[in-house]
Amino acid sequence: ISLSDEWQTYIISPRDFGMWDNSRDGKRGGSGDSLDPASLASFEFAIMSTVQEEEDYPATTPTGKPQDIYIGAVKLISGGDLPEIKEPMDMPAFFPAIHMYRCSADTVTFEGGSISVTECVMPFFRNQGYGLDNGGAFRQVPLARCMEKGREKGMAAQAIYHREDSAFHGGTWVFAGIDPAALAGAPALVDLLADCFTDRPRFLCAGTDRFSYLPGETVTVGAKASGADGASVNILIKDEPWTPVFTRTVRPGETASLTLSEPGFYTAEITLEKDGQVTDRISQDFSVFDPGSRSWENIIRSEEGHLWCGDEKWVPVGVNYWPMYAAGVPLRTEEGGGAWLAADEYLPDRIEADLRLLSDMDINAVSTQYLRLSEAPQIRDFVERCEKYGIRVHLFLEGCHPLDVREETAAALVKAASLGQARAMFCYDLGWEVSLGGEDIRRALNGQWNRWLTREYGSPETALTLLGYTPSITGGLYNGPTDMQIRQPDKKSLPFIAAYRRFLDDLIGKGLQKSVRNLRKYDPWTCMGLRNGAGGNGTVVYAHIFPYDMKAGARHLDILCPEGYNLGATSLYMGMGELTNLQCRLVSGGKPVVWIEYGVHLFIGSTPRGYRQEDALKKLQYQTNYYRTMADFVARSSATGSFAWWYPGGYRIDERSDYGIAEPDLTPRGALTALSDRAADQLAGDVWPRDAEETLVYDRDLYAKGYGDFFEKNARRVSERLQEGKYTRLATPGTGLTTRTLKPEGVGNIPYRGIGPVKYLDSEIDSIRCGSESLMESGTLRPRPGARFTVTMANTDECLWENEGEGRVRLRVSRDGGEDYFPLDRRCGYLETASASFVLKDRPSTVRLRLVA
């Protein structure tokens, strides 16, 4: 609803309240899922800016003069009072306008000729019928190409052939986005369009049974056709130099098989022929995977605060990638997979065009998602094509979330797509915009929360007495902080909130330890990361949903990945992200910081029928300025690289937005050009550590809203110094302390009374080994009496562990009938490991391990 200075009447249908495709149970969202009025309990009004006009401010900062906004005469109407609202029919690749785009052109080419034009209206590429078993509801056939200065920009005309069992019952649609006067001057093209309605043999689909093969695997190829009695299918397989490697003629519905041992890229050219006339053709690309070898020379590794490939630094100038043809269609299948990676929708030739453009524009990394085993051949083909263009892949992988680790799922995905052998792989994304959610969702953690209180304090009641706050109880378990305690905190509950954050550090850390350890079995080379910062790191309005603290599990990651949606388009407000850089460096021991998402929308907030390409294009300059400023920020700050959100221009259905940095005709928008112009600057600016003249101290326990509070109070000052060419050092009160110099204080800044966790002292057990058996942290071992145990532990907080003399840290081994203490084998700094060994002469039923200082 657009605001104005006059009263306006609006009628809003329940269909206008679409459910976003991101519900936590995976059962809501997607096309057609909207509000059920019978389930409505309450509603509220909020004001949202759809355009960031003020470039001097980040999106979260109010600008301009205060305004009074009046909302009056709100009515709920139903039944006969409800005006009829007709939804436009969704016609795939045709209507509404989100399926089309307008662009400049000088020529339209087609079979048998060409014509001059000044512009075209072109459909996005859709299902082309690729593959032996393509089950799509329709097949799109390009009939004419739009050209400008010799470059192909897309389709100027198309035919859509619907299957008999589809919603459009075998119908044929033809479209030409060409000025009628120009079309009238091209009778050969008119004849070509009209011929689409003739009853002649046509392919339903044709190609190979997969898009990617291992060397030596059998390739099965063939076609399915309609109206093809007496027709033949001619198969020609070519390698990338376009040398024929296989030919065969079969009947429709029959297949041919071959074996390809040479890795590379291939094309299956398939024609349908009857009575000596070719009536249809499909040309489908596929690949044979090159298992090759991964080694120090070709992997991306994280060392000494930088990313390296061989002995050269590597800086990701990246973009979150969905192909251009993802615009205007749902991003997920009904089964929950990625739509563009579904075998029926995968278009390797269009992906090739995207990657060629990105490579030409100096983009060297892409980030995307891999969700289902059925996507494995397509992902393997995609990763191979990325390697061809020198582009590395940052890949979200299902089954790796630290609070929902599904080891078999993640392992199957890695193995099925041969990711452990793929040289283009850069990093696994273990969680997508991770947060715990509101208090109702967080109650699912109450069992673990209460067990943690018992382990650390002896009992929940003792803990709550020391922390000075007693929460409500649900199902016999104490709850964690409420949303209101975070939104409107009081000093009384600060220690309680601090203890909850410490609990989350431990919980998330163990989850990441499990997830990473599982992946390393199948891929020891690829980096590990976690997409953090729901809404932008430091965005205080999201504090109540508990975005993961960057400290949680940082030890197990190779890069730290914040998001930048709360940063503005000027150097000052973009530079506020330097504080997040410093926080990431501090909690990770200096590991590289890669801004995994940032961007500004050109359009947001309307239903598909409200999207207008011309409205989005009005904001191009602002987007360009934002991207130029972000590239400059990465080059001169403590960051290592970045990934823009996102590549394809056009309407994104689930979010109702356009964040794209390239036009649908593969013309770079100013944002992409800005990244290209500053790619070399980002590599040259990869300096860490920076010489700092000022130290800023962060005590998380003072802030109920966590890092968001600290960011709001300090980020501008850090940025002001950055604009002056001065750098800041971030520390905590625990920085530089050892167990010899530490004065114990309880978590939450409460006096330490000999019970409960101590600030700046925390640990994880990496392994418990006895002979050939080992455990990660707990479980069952069956050693012989006299067996030697070795326990390896990691220091997960800042205070260094002494192993000798005053303040030394020892391993306490408690068992039936007593306890013993054993020394560590070395001093142990933050994120380092140390071990302790001991022998059990008897066979106690239970052994408990704990570090004590």
Image (tube, grey):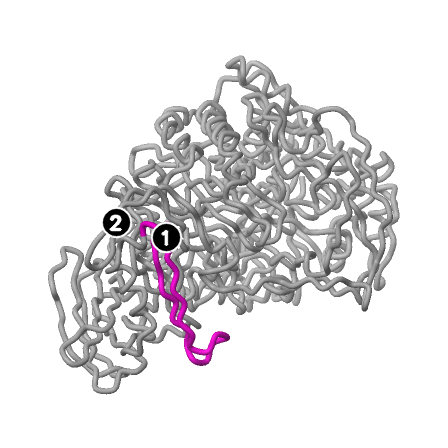
Numbered label attached to residue 589? none
Q: What amino acid is at disc 1?
A: Pro
Label 2 element class: strand
Nearer the observer, 799 or 494: 494
Numbered label attached to residue 115? 2
Nearer the observer, 553 or 203: 203
Q: Residues within 10 Å of mark 1 (few under 14, many from 20)?
A: few
Nearer the observer, 608 or 307: 608
As displayed, is residue 216 above or below residue 654?
A: below
- Picture coordinates of residue 580, whole percent (x, y): 58, 31
> What distance separates the C-alpha of mark 2 from that of mark 1?
12 Å
The N terminus, quarter of image: top right
Label 1 element class: helix
Based on the displayed image, in which of its 4 quarters is residue 405 positioned? bottom right
From the viewer's perspective, tell me whether residue 571 is left or right of residue 807: left
From the viewer's perspective, tell me whether residue 754 is left or right of residue 682: right
Q: What amino acid is at disc 2?
A: Ile
Query: Which residue is tagged 1?
Result: 180
The C terminus, quarter of image: top right
**In the rendered structure, does residue 170 fall within the stretch colored magenta?**
yes
Sequence-earlier tag: 2 or 1: 2
Q: What residue appears at the point 21 percent right and 61 percent down from the top-left corner?
A: 266
As displayed, is residue 436 above or below residue 407?
A: above
> What's the magenta region?
155-182
- Picture coordinates of residue 2, whole percent (x, y): 69, 41
